[in-house]
Image (cartoon, rainbow, N blue to C red):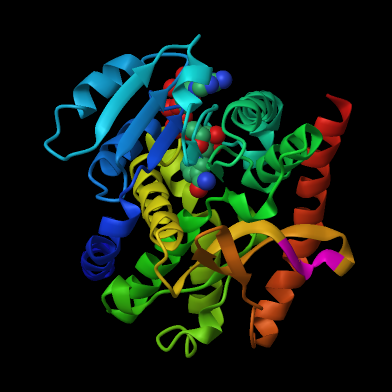
Amino acid sequence: MLARTAVRALANSRQFSSSAARQTKVAVLGAGGGIGQPLSLLLKNDPLVTSLSLYDIRGAPGVAADVSHIDTPSEVHGYAADKLDEALEGVKVVVIPAGVPRKPGMTRDDLFNTNASIVRDLAAAVGRVAPEAHILVISNPVNSTVPIVSAVLEKLGVYDPRRVFGVTTLDVVRAARFLGGIAGADPADTRVTVIGGHSGATIVPLLSQTEKGKGITGEVYDQLVHRIQFGGDEVVKAKDGAGSATLSMAYAGATFTHALLRGLSGEKGVITPTFVKSPLYEDQGIDFFSSNVELGPNGVEKIHPIGEISAQEEKLLAACLPDLKKNIEKGKAFVAQS
Ligand SMILES: NC(=O)c1ccc[n+]([C@@H]2O[C@H](COP(=O)([O-])OP(=O)(O)OC[C@H]3O[C@@H](n4cnc5c(N)ncnc54)[C@H](O)[C@@H]3O)[C@@H](O)[C@H]2O)c1
């Protein structure tokens, strides 16, 4: 899928980069990890990134030294555990893959106890040092960590909901790939809008809105939806205790970061699903939701409605909402008690 979309995106970004290339410093917090390392590599290759700031409690200077030899113009700096504030100085975009990944048998919610405090503390540092930065949260459980980041920034009085994103791109990538496999088509032609949240039943693919997906029914439909919702488990199982998706996640993280940078640079029509503060289900007490979002110079420019969906998708959504609500409330309660 990247092939065609990336070439187009790259051509567009070149067009826009002269005005936007000014100074776009991007930080990766958790850069020494399974996701952080390949994500840093891909961001070094992004023409819209002029400076890369790599931070981790372990190993970031080494990753930075390595990545810095790649022959693209951006600068790379690595920061050790005690240099978080320095790492964040002047950054425009902060990507956070810091935290522990799943082991077989674990849900994303099982990571809450460890990752909630890691994300809370990193968000507080961003709020203090780079309050205008856009924050892209990869650390799981995303359904809770995004509300955590938002609540921390709110406490600090620097929260702008247009600048906080949960990265759900991997669900979109998997949906395109799996549907492409079934339809015998190039995944570039089987892009699927995925709404809701980022774990199990909260992941709702809108196959009825795609040309190749709308005719799929019965068992094939059920299996496809299940695979999109639980595809992460395939990787966790295959890695057998060594973690969860890292390479496909780095790809997804770099793809979303690039989309945001295109929007920030003034390009119009950059639309992708992402988990943000959203009015769509606010009346049901669910104030964060993933749907198609147009990205622009201030981050979230426009939140698109979900559009027409099938009866089956209505059912998926009905199963998503209560879980999502609980995950969001858990994140908020954590910050309120901190
Ligand atoms: N959003 C998604 O679609 C998605 C997909 C896959 C994984 N994830 C999540 O991403 C996170 C990272 O996964 P991974 O496989 O890279 O794990 P990993 O253990 O390989 O790497 C995590 C890194 O975070 C670092 N770290 C821990 N505490 C830190 C802190 N306070 N400050 C800075 N760095 C810190 C660790 O030193 C480590 O290098 C996990 O929470 C995982 O569940 C999200």
Q: Position of residue 285 (x, y in %)?
A: 87, 60
Q: Position of residue 165 (x, y in %)?
A: 58, 51
Work out whether 163 lies above or below 238.
below
Work out whether 229 lies above or below 62.
below
The residue lying toward the viewer, choosing from 197 and 314, is 197
Q: Does the rendering let one see residue 204?
A: no
Work out whether 91 lies above or below 6.
above
- Quadrant location, the C terminus: top right
Residue 213 on the magenta segment: no
Q: Magenta stretch: give its range.
A: 278-282
Q: Main secondary structure of the magenta part?
A: strand
Decide if residue 41 is on the left or right side of residue 148: left
Q: Quadrant location of residue 146? A: top right
User: Which residue is depicted at the point 22% across and 70% down?
Assistant: 4
User: Which residue is depicted at the point 42% across and 42% down?
Assistant: 245
Q: Does the rendering let one see residue 209?
A: yes
The residue lying toward the viewer, choosing from 62 and 130, is 130
